Amino acid sequence: MRETLNAAIAAAVASAIESGKLPLPSVPEVSVERPRDPAHGDWATNIALVSAKAAGMPPRVVAEIVAGELRSALAGVAESVETAGPGFINIRLSRGVVAEVVTRVRAAGASFGAAEPTGRRVQVEFVSANPVGPMHVGHGRWAALGDSIARLLEHAGDEVQREFYINDAGVQMDVFAASVSARYLELCGREAAFPEDGYRGAYIIEIAREIHAEEATCWLDAAPEAREAHFREKAYAQVLEHLKRVLHGMGVDFDVWFSERSLHAAGEGGGPSAIERGIERLRRAGHVFEHEGAVWFRSSGFGDDKDRVLKKADGSYTYFAADVAYHAGKFDRGFDLVIDIWGADHHGYVKRMESAVTALGHPGGLEVVIGQLVNLFRNGEVVRMSKRTGEMVTFEDLLDEVGADAARYFFLRRSTDQPLDFDIGLAKERSSDNPVYYVQYAHARICSILRKAAGADTADESVDIEAVAGGIMVTPEALALLGAEPGTLAGEAELGLLRKIAEFGDVVEVAARQRAPHKLTTYAEDLASAFHQFYTHCQVVVDDPVLRSARLALSDASRIVLATTLGLLGVNAPQRM
RNA sequence: GCGCCCGUAGCUCAGUUGGAUAGAGCGGGAGACUUCUAAUCUCUAGGUCGGGGGUUCGAAUCCCUCCGGGCGUGCCA
């Protein structure tokens, strides 16, 4: 519809110019928008305001001229074309045209609002936690965020791969192993000094206990190096298993789990490692220099504050060097766009990574989304956590308590760059205060209506909703009954719902482009609200078979869009509550 | 000091990249179930969009400046 109107407006302006009514050198950029206020119609254009100056005429006069042309061009499509305010042209579509969206939604089903395949290959990398402990709630937010962005991009036509980068190289793994080792020795009844900077969480004891249960005391007198090397792998495997299980439990499954270690390992036939080859690439491009015994990347040449070390004076590589190699590899794998989702505490890292990707020959190929942190509350009270003592509410605890649907929904409800206050009490509440239930309830209500329409008990779970929905037959003439009584509560409720459904395509497009799933939760709540109003003011299963078919079809279209929206959020759409 | 993010109703936040009278939920006040789920709906109160300049037909939105908060600023990961 947007395209149709754009074209019609451009043509109207062109014809006004041609007939000499409008003194303009050329047709300006046309844009139509949905007015905030429904009293302003379905669509509005500011074309007259934009071009008034060039035409040397007051905006309202320009608007009148264009509106005159538009009226005849849009006969049959628009019910009215009016000028208003400082010079807007408001277009009100005829009811039949507005109601067509019901047919389009029901024909498209879950793919309503989806774009044609773009052929673009996108990788979304997210969570990417150190495998040395349980996920915290921030990881949960990033998991929900990354997965939903991936779903949005898929809906927008991209081919998407989800990847988890496992930081399994580096000193944190040694600290981890030493911590487990100390707990193991304690379990064996031996005094053991706990590492100064060790991980003190109770989960370390759990891991040690499992090893102890399996292998008893056979590592008690082993050389510390051998013991820790063994424990490191055992503990790593356990944590990785935990990560996969928790993520799967919330509906997040990765295509690739990428090990940082593989970047350090020698290449084919003992050749240079991926890290060494990555540095070599930067060197060949002329962006590497040596200084004070270290190897540097000249990131300052790409807008970074300062240059960054790749290889330390002691011969080891920085985390950044591994990341350079890792990102080089992503583009080798053929991705057109690489999206990284990082916690806010890493935002100082963005510039250097972008610099490296540009230096590798992929300017603009990397996009970093920064996810702000999560503050946990319980009924208004802050939940205190201590990193030092390891006391914390893990993400798994949170999932167990509030469930995957509420967790995902709340994580995605705020814009990405906004810190999130997560209230556990509210997320569990089964009331109207809780937006996730509000939205799901609208979906369940629709299913209940469909069951009734099929002549079944409204609570009969064995009813196949899709089959019932597929059996609803409706004619364009019937659909034109929707909103046939504007000004009445029923008529306005029907029109409001139709308009909200018609917005969906725009919402998905913007949410995908801006990597902003929170626009989906806002939309979901608006759509649910529009449906609840419709439900209150309009009896769906009425005696008149024509009106009934129209309202059933509208309910069904609402159901489909509601379910699709929730699907993009990764939240279930229950048929009964 | 420098860099990034944020500041909108009592609270938590939207605001479609410059549009019309700035919105929603919660909280406050008043109402609606013989009806397809009241986990719902209706009405009402509440604002110098942190302050001040600027850009223009038009600014919460763009530019400058100041105030206030968060994070970052390692040859750590």
Image: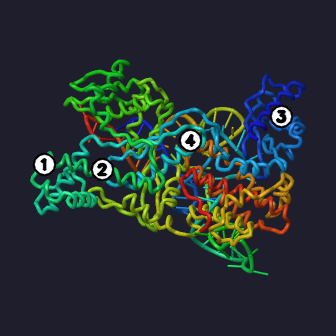
Disc ID at residue A153? 4
Instruction: Locate residue A382, reporting x and y percent.
Output: 40, 63
Say few, some or many: other residues with alpha carbon within 10 Å of mark 3 (under 14 / 14 to 19 / 20 or more). many
The image position of residue A467, as x and y in percent, is 69, 59
Residue receiving disc 3:
A62
- Residue A246: tell me if it is visible: yes
Residue that carries the numbered disc 2 in the rendered image? A237
Tell which tag, 1 or 2, sits nearer the viewer.
2
- Is residue A198 shown left or right of residue A98? left
Q: Earlier in the sequence, mark 1 or mark 2?
A: 1
Name the residue located 26 percent from the left edge and 22 percent from the top edge.
A290
Q: Secondary structure at mark 3?
A: helix
Q: Is residue B48 above or below residue A281?
A: below
Q: Secondary structure at mark 1?
A: helix
Which of marks 1 and 3 precedes in the sequence?
Answer: 3
Question: For the residue marked with disc 2, what is the amino acid?
Answer: Ala
Q: Quadrant of residue A254?
A: top left
Q: Residues within 10 Å of mark 2 (few under 14, many from 20)?
A: some
Would residue A98 appear left or right of A359 to someone viewing this image?
right
Q: Chain of mark 1?
A: A
Q: Are marks 3 and 4 in contact (CB under 8 Å)?
A: no
Is residue A120 positioned above or below A148 on the image? above
The residue that mark 1 highlights is: A224
Q: Earlier in the sequence, mark 4 or mark 1?
A: 4
